[in-house]
Image (spheres, rainbow, N blue to C red):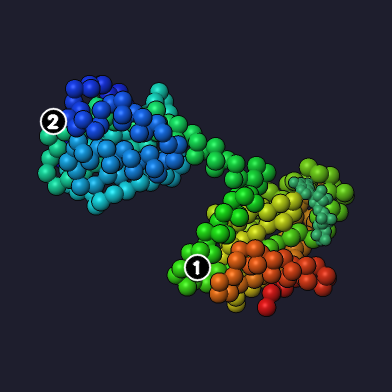
Amino acid sequence: MQNALNQSIISLDANSFKDPKSHPLQLSFILQSTLNLYELMKRFHQELKNLVNYQSFNYHHAESKNKFEVGKLQYYQARYQLKIENTSLGEIVLSKNIAFTQEEIHTLENILVFLLMPLRNALAYEHAIRLSMIDPLTHLCNRQAFDMTLQREIEFAKRHQNNLSLLIVDIDFFKQINDTYGHQAGDLVLVEFAERLRQIHRQSDMIFRYGGEEFTLILAHTEHKGAVQVAERICQKTAEIPFIIKQRNVTITVSIGVSTHQGAESNQKLFSRADIALYTAKAAGRNQVKCSN
Ligand SMILES: Nc1nc2c(ncn2[C@@H]2O[C@H](COP(=O)(O)OP(=O)(O)OP(=O)(O)O)[C@@H](O)[C@H]2O)c(=O)[nH]1
């Protein structure tokens, strides 16, 4: 098997550009004019396939879990770990069912060099966007991420006629916790509660800190009955296992509103129904689940 590993230093040779469309300057411009990682990989692949014959193109960046895959992996592979100084920019694997020629490897290595800086920029941009979607206290996704995810999941559910439910979970009398034990202790309760939610609901990318002491869960592929079961479990487990605050066992409860997506309903409507259900649970004495009908 042909394997070219750890090619972090690649020599530049403009003569190897056989296709006039892919002149280095033009290629550089094409790659530098996007910060979107997916778009960048798409453009790179489009340019590269004019110069090198291959059947599959695979990009993977382990740290950010980004992937771009075209075609099915074949026996003969050219594999490159992309790096700038000590920063890993991921791995590119090209493959085909006959061996790469020396000329192809040479061209490939020359063209890869143009990807490095735009790739570093795109990864940094993506990282910054991701950070802006994370709540720094609980490390759950934040409200902005929730709005985007709910929109996406509703569209997906409509297209595939899947069930989708929403839970809004609000800690009861949280102000009292702050007032009694201090704001820092209140913060620790939020962190612990977020961790408990992760344990109860394994799809942690669908749990959000909506704001303050309010959390939301998007339950994809979940009909009304299943969503109520999840909500009941959160409610029971929260009340059942006391939180340790300043070496004291403190019982904390939550109220939960549940709604299940109906027909062509908008995300605002789905959210508003769960919110009304939450309000009903609070009004009915808290520590309980209420559903929207
Ligand atoms: N410690 C801490 N407190 C927060 C944070 N965000 C919001 N809060 C507090 O959460 C409390 C919410 O209080 P309220 O809206 O009155 O609700 P509650 O006391 O939980 O009462 P109910 O929801 O009606 O059961 C306020 O005291 C906010 O200051 C945070 O990040 N950390």
Residue type of the residue flagged with mark 1: Ala
- Specify the quadrant of the image occupied by residue 204: bottom right
For the point 62% across and 61% down, the residue is 217
Residue type of the residue flagged with mark 2: Gln
Label 1, ligand 1: CB separation under 8 Å: no
Name the residue beneath numbered marker 2: 102
Q: Considering only vertical position in the picture, is 15 above or below 236?
A: above
Label 2, ligand 1: CB separation under 8 Å: no
- Specify the quadrant of the image occupied by residue 120: top left
For the point 34% across and 31% down, the residue is 115
Q: Is residue 113 visible?
A: no
Mark 2 Cα shell of 10 Å, populated few (<14), some (14-19), many (≥20): few
Measured as percent of width and height from the top left, residue 94 is found at: 24, 41
For marks 2 and 1, give the CA distance. 49 Å
In this view, the residue in front, 120 or 35, is 35
Figure quadrant of the N terminus: top left
Mark 1 Cα shell of 10 Å, populated few (<14), some (14-19), many (≥20): some
In this view, the residue in front, 145 or 5, is 145
Looking at the image, tell me whether mark 2 or mark 1 is earlier in sequence order.
Answer: 2
Name the residue beneath numbered marker 1: 157
In this view, the residue in front, 17 or 237, is 17
